[in-house]
Every structure is written in C-alpha cells, then in structure tokens.
Image: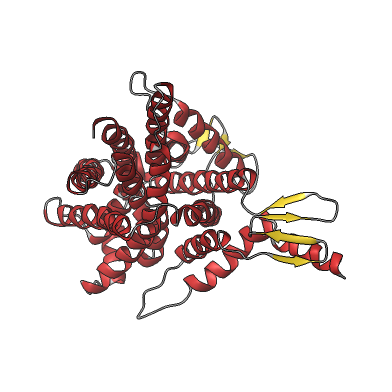
Amino acid sequence: MTAYLAGVCSSALSFIFIVFAISTVGYLVGGIKIKGIELGTAGVLLVALIWGVFVNFIPSFHIGSSQIVDGVKVWAEDAKEITLWSPKIKANFGIVSSIGTALFVTAVGLIAGPKFFRSFNKSTLAYIVLGIIIIAIGAVTAILFTVFDKNMSSSMAVGLLTGGLTSTPGFSAGKEVAMALDEAAKAAGEISNLEADVTAGYGIAYTFGVLGVVLFVQIVPKILKIDMAKERENFQAANQVVIPEPKKALSAIDPFGFFAFTLAIALGCLIGSIKIPGINFSLGNSGGCLIGGLIVGHFAHIGNIDCRIKKETLNFMRELGLVLFLIGAGVPGGVNFIDKFRWTYFIYGAIMTLVPMIVGYIIARYVFKLSILNNLGAITGGMTSTPALGTLIATAGTDEVSAAYAATYPFALVSIVLAAKIIIMLF
C-alpha cells in the first residue's frame, strides 16, 4: 500500500501533471467575474505563480520508505531521486515558455499578416513612436529609482523594468550584460552578484507586470463607458482591407495548415537568431516568430503550395501558446518572487508598469488620436504584454486588434533590449 501511495505521490508531482493541473485550476480562477472584470487566461499565470511560491515551502513528509525532503527531493525505494525544482525541471519550464511564446506570436503574426503590410498609413508611424516612447519612459523611471534609492543597483532596476514590462528578451539581454560584468569582477578577484539581482527583480515585478496590463485593457473601456459593439463595428469598417485572392490554383499540404504554421516558426527562429554586429542584438525567437508569421501570412503561398490557415486553427494555436507561455514563465517567476523580495522593489516594479502604460495611452489618445481598440492594441504591444493581447482580443470581440500589437511590438522589443543593456553598463 505504501509503495502504491508513493507511486501516486510521485505521479502527482510529475512535470506533466503539474503543467496541466495549473492550466485546469487557472482557467477556473480566470473564469471568475467581479463586476464584469475577469482574469481570463491570465488566471493560469496567477496559479502558476502561486505554485512557484508554494514549491519553496512544501513541508517534509514520509510515505513508507519514500520521503519528501524539504519539499525539494523525493527518494524512492530504489534510491532513485525525483526532484520538484531541479535544474532539469527549471529547464523544462523554460522550454514550455519558449514553445508557448513561439506558438502565440506566430499565430498573431499569421492573423495580422494578410492586412499588416497592406494597411500601412499615418497611424503606422504612431505605433512605431509609441513602442519607443513607452519603453523610454519605463527606462527613465528605472534610472530615477536608482538615483533616489542608493540601495538599489542598476541590475535590480533592469530586472524590475523587464519584469514590469514582461519582456523576456529584455530580461535575457540584462542577464547577458550582468553575467559578463560578474565574470570580469571574478577575474579581478572581486565579488559581484549582478545576474542574481536581475533575476530576482524580474521575478518580483513580473506578477504585477502581467496582471496590471491585463486588468488595464478591461478597466479602461468600462471607466470610459465604451460601447464595445459600436466601437468594434467602427473599428472593423475603418480597418477593412481588400485582400486579393491568389490568381492560380493552390494545393494544401495538410488540412489544418500545420505546414504553413511550422514554416513560419522555423523562419522566425532563423530571423530571430540574426545578430547585429557591435551591439550583439537580435530579435530572439519571440520577435523573430512574429516577423515570420507576418511574412507567411502576407504572401499566403509558396509557388502553388497554399499557406493560408483557417481562423479556427490560428485561434486554437494562439490560445494554446498563451497558456504554455504563462505556465512556463509563471512558475519560475513564483520561485524567484521570494528571492530578495522587498515591498519597495515590488512598488517600484508596479510604477514601472503603470507609468509607461498610462502615459502611452494618453499620447495615443490625445496626440495620435487612435481609436480605443487601436490604442489598447498599441499599448499591449508597447508593453510587450503577450497575455494582455489575449485579454484584449476577448474584450474587443475581434482579433484584428492584433495588427496594432504587431506594429508596435517589434520596436518596443528592440528598445527594451537596448535599454536593459544601457542601464546596467552606464548606471
């Protein structure tokens, strides 16, 4: 009996079980509405974060000769070690996050692709400017905190900034510079822990960074008492683009369009791996897959091979990708949340989320005169917030808001990567 219970315990703590259990509970939490506001898919993130924190405090207990030691290791009867948070499992969540990001942004690119390049107009410049301004405001805010709080390092500020803007590429760029500085300090016989500061700051600010933008795109229309149905109708009429049908007969490789989808991901990974000499900058898989999706979605065929994908398939892949991303990023974020946690740091991170978002919204509304849906779409792109776009699509009732996200996101991505490197090196 004890061996059976030990087996059940080990299965219940398996990586696959945890991933899907988080998703199940997360959707239940996300479906709870309070005065018309709900977390939606972001509920998965909340549960993932809670689990990440919980892993640090799982108490010890025994089942026969099997035991859980400090909530970290399971020793089975054959002395085989199973771990709850080993480097391998941490890497597994990283893979889940990467796959989720690739699926989500590729689907967004494919949805926006047919209209994206054909609808360039004056508002396109607005999206570019917004992407740069939002990140610039966040960067300035981070720098000011390092000036006023002498106890906060620039590496911690970068962690809080990239977490507050939910930017994995920015986080990676900050870690890269921090690691190089740590190695240089080590070679000089000095002790430096900048990389740990970046990681801890990211974990502290990430929670509010996601939930803040997710709630913002739902609350603003309610505060302004927007008639979403009318706004959606006007939005679709204003953004209507006639897409020419291919002039020759096309043949599909598979009935679901997986060939075109995987082609877009592969192309995106190649694009994302290209590095600009001198500054060692690349779009990474997230930015590259977005561009890959836009390109495949725009051309829609290769010779006589049909690369058009059904809307239902794209919606499914987008949602699946979003869930995997939230789980893969949320659990490590929860684990890191308690490391070096300070309430002041949490507040700094929240401000780095709110100030760029609010200022960006005001500029988009009063300077560029964008409609509410284009405005919020640009905000989600400027904040590099993948979960918020999913929420906005559900709130707006149309996935065409992804065009504003896709137009703003690449420029925000480039800006946050450069900002992260500059802040650590100069401040």
Q: Is residue 90 left or right of residue 181?
A: right
Residue sitting farthest toward the right = 1
Residue sitting farthest toward the front = 189
Residue appearing at x 39%, y 28% in the figure: 190
Image quadrant in which the N terminus is located: bottom right
Tally the marks. Answer: 0
Vertical position of residue 299 compared to residue 95: above or below: above
Residue appearing at x 59%, y 43% in the figure: 91
Q: Is residue 336 left or right of residue 177?
A: right
Q: Position of residue 371 (x, y in %)?
A: 22, 58
Q: Position of residue 79 (x, y in %)?
A: 82, 50
Depth check, front residue: 75 or 14: 75
Is residue 85 at least partly visible in the picture?
yes
Image quadrant in which the C terminus is located: top left
Q: Quadrant of residue 226?
A: bottom left
Residue appearing at x 56%, y 63% in the figure: 57
Q: Position of residue 298 (x, y in %)?
A: 42, 38
Is residue 399 at least partly visible in the picture?
no
Residue sitting farthest toward the left = 367
Residue sitting farthest toward the top = 277
Depth check, front residue: 350 or 283: 350
Residue appearing at x 15%, y 50% in the figure: 368
Colour setting: secondary structure
Q: Position of residue 154 (x, y in %)?
A: 28, 40
Q: Is residue 151 left or right of residue 168?
A: left
